[in-house]
Image (spheres, rainbow, N blue to C red):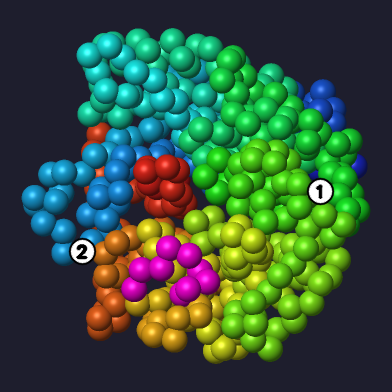
Amino acid sequence: MAVPQEYNIDGLIQLGDNILLELVGEITEFHDLKQVLSVNKKFFSFIDHPRFYNLIEAGFSHLYRRALILHTRDSIETVLDPDRTDENKAKIQSSIFDLKTRLTKDPNFLSKKIKKIALVLNNYSIKDFNQYLNQAVIYINGLNQLKVDFYTFPENMNQIRVDKSRAWLQKMRMPPDNIQFVDLQSSGDVSFALTTDGKLWSRVINDDGTLVTVNGEVWRLNPHFSAENGLIPSSVGPSKIRYFSFEFNRLIVILENGAVFAYGPLQEFQGQLNIPDNGFIELTDSSKMKSHSPDELHGELSGEVGPFGIFGSYHVVKYFQSAEAFLTVDGIVLAKSQTVNEKKYKYSFTPINPIVHEGEKISQIYHHQGRSAFVTESGRVIYAQGVFIEMQPLITDPNTKWKNLKLPFDVDELETLILTDNLHCTALRKDGTIFNIRHCDDAVRDTTDYVSELANADGKGAGMKIKQFMRIAQCSIFIFQ
């Protein structure tokens, strides 16, 4: 039973044990926990307190523990289809990645939590086998450390392949554990991770944007994004990284001030002057990159030259992978467009006429295998009926048929849309529920149970909720909490 002095208040360090423990229990970030525990030696006594670890685990319960990895495009389509057949279900290729079952000897529960996760891939050939793909999982754990773990698809499992994969993994040199990370992105071949002080570490990419072919499995602080205090220099001024993402092996980095960089293969920008096949360029450098906006795309929106280089007068804040489109701070979509100049394609990013989405601001764009969908701020999903590999013909084709769907919940609750080749749209709500919306009649069906069933195939994932979804190469990943 608690006694009065356990609640005494006489300055922060003189707080009673129960109040200090309640304070610790409210902490949800490892960096903050270290700061609090370093205030005074009195806090070290909590380590032996019976409530300490229970409170810490509760405070960090928002972190992830388990991932369901679907290995093929057909697998994700079957999993999300409420009308799946037993024959289709038998073809699903999936596996579970769970740190709690892997790191059984590590006593620190935070090392078994996942903040961010991605796959890394490596192609090689084995005698008597076709080309084979090494796989590994990289992740940021609850201690904000960047880690790697062995992983291979069960259908590819044999001793020769396992030995090759483990030998490859042993060559990977990870950052020191004292470097703290907050975000992680991977194309499969190339990977980047963002530190708490705003710097990027990278693997398998040279300074000139080419892929590393010798000793490539070494993480290093990338010199293009290593500025003091995370203030990356640009033509718009120094600023911190707001967002970074991949388009195949090309990294797109957006700063808080609207500056944008492309790093890696640059062939699509060679309609501009003096652009190499691979490299590092600032797309918002107006002295080098010029905007060009076809009238049939931007309509009444401004197509004028401005301070943001290839984007003209538009300040972008997000890039949408696969759709090859940016979103501006005002909710305007800038889609990749092209013109032919001296037998060369000249690419630019053009504001889309808002008549396409009936004047509403766009909050999200999704594109997969030629299918596109726009989510408006009111929660409408506007998608094109048909397959369009690029955004420009989708917008300009007078025969494009558009259809409107309404999300079955408030747009603020949307975690992500998941598009497949099936004739339906799938929405993941932030509470972990998956809704299937059929195109032909707008019927809404809950398809959460089957994903959860696969994630509990080993009997150790019961009751967990879906928190995130991502695609890397041909794989689809559900993250569970």
Residue reaching furthest to the left: 87
Residue closer to the observer: 320 or 378: 320
Query: Where in the figure is residue 422, as x and y percent of width and height?
Result: 26, 64
Q: Name the amino acid type tagged 2.
A: Pro
**For residue 276, side relative to residue 363 (left or right):** right
- For label 2, the SS is loop
Q: Where's the N terminus, which quadrant? A: top right
**For residue 118, side relative to residue 233 (left or right):** left
Structural crowding at the residue carrying mark 2, measured as other residues with C-alpha within 10 Å and reported as few (<14), some (14–19) or many (≥20): some
Residues under labels 2 and 1: Cα distance?
A: 43 Å
Structural crowding at the residue carrying mark 1, measured as other residues with C-alpha within 10 Å and reported as few (<14), some (14–19) or many (≥20): many
- From where the camera sits, is residue 146 visible? no
Q: In which quarter of the image is residue 400?
A: bottom left
Tag nearer the camera, 2 or 1: 1
Query: Where in the figure is residue 403, as x and y percent of width and height?
Result: 38, 83
Query: Where in the figure is residue 423, as x and y percent of width and height?
Result: 27, 70
* Point 56% across, 33% down: residue: 190
* Point 89% across, 36% down: residue: 228
Q: Do the residues labelled 2 and 1 touch (CB within 8 Å)?
A: no
* Residue 191 counted in the magenta span: no
**Residue that label 2 marks:** 82
Extent of the magenta region: 386-394
**Residue that label 1 marks:** 240
How many labels were placed on the picture? 2
Q: Name the amino acid type tagged 1.
A: Lys
